[in-house]
Amino acid sequence: MYNLKLKQNGNICYNYDYICEKNHTMHQILVNTLLFKGLAPNEIDDLLVSITYKNKKFTKNETIAFSGSELNGINILLRGSVRGEMVDYSGKVIKIEDIESPRTLAPAFLFGENNNYPVDIVANNNVELLYFHKNVFLKILQLNQTVLMNYLNIISTKSQFLSTKLKFLSFQTIKGKFAHYLINLAKQDNNILILPLSQTKLADLFGVSRPALGRVIRELHNDKIIYAEGKSIKILNRNVLINLIK
């Protein structure tokens, strides 16, 4: 499938629709990724001059990777959107997060004893990925300290996100999840805030349905614990919210 290699502008690439024909466009996309942050397009050219990589394409709702499958390289989402989801013991599908391009998929799980995908990765629409095998990616990290530092920052941030996600899932009630979210979002001396996410995305984050979350917000509003108007929230009784978390 990838046995035909071409030379273009000093780069070795696979002749697979997009990579060779739109090499510069790819590098312009990589400039905007967290992994290659701080590098100019010509620096990416120099870095990838002796690196082999693959271009992968998937259509809407196609599974890119299954939970538990081996993660043997880095996939960078060049175009499109994917979602990470998992199935609980009752068969309910829980969306973990939506990932918009350009992003790196499951970067924190590439190394370690159990370097497997933690969730299913499913395409939300037509997507395009750039793939580096693990050994190739190690070479990139050794060649460029900026990419190395970017990678370390990415996996640290991801670990913090997963820690927050576990906190949400550990609460038994939706009120507890939402109260915890509001208390962490609001500043100590400011009870007025704007929700950065829609109710749909908040529901996905909490692992609950949107109608159930909407009912909780209305109940907290009617009980005068908060005042809710669209994404605008005013905390009226902080102590009650804190007690919901305990």
Image: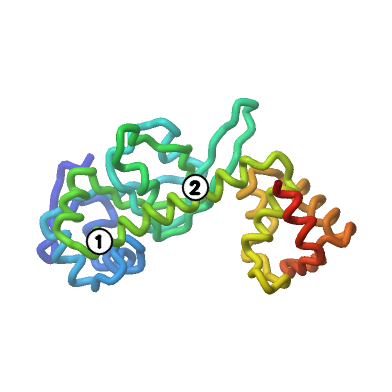
Mark 2 crowdedness (10 Å alpha carbons): few <14, some 14-19, many ≥20: few
Q: Amino acid at mark 2?
A: Leu
Residue in the image at 37% along x and 52% along y: 155
Q: Amino acid at mark 1?
A: Val
**Image quadrant in which the N terminus is located:** top left
Separation of marks 1 and 2 at Cα, in angstroms? 22 Å
Residue in the image at 72% along x and 70% along y: 191
Mark 1 crowdedness (10 Å alpha carbons): few <14, some 14-19, many ≥20: some
Query: In the picture provided, is 241 more to the left or to the right than 156?
Result: right
Q: Residue furthest top?
A: 89
28 and 219: which is toward the camera:
219
The residue labelled by disc 1 is 147
- Picture coordinates of residue 88 (x, y %)? 59, 30
Q: Quadrant of residue 20?
A: bottom left
The answer to whether 184 is drawn above or below residue 193 in the figure is above
Q: Say which element carries label 2.
A: helix
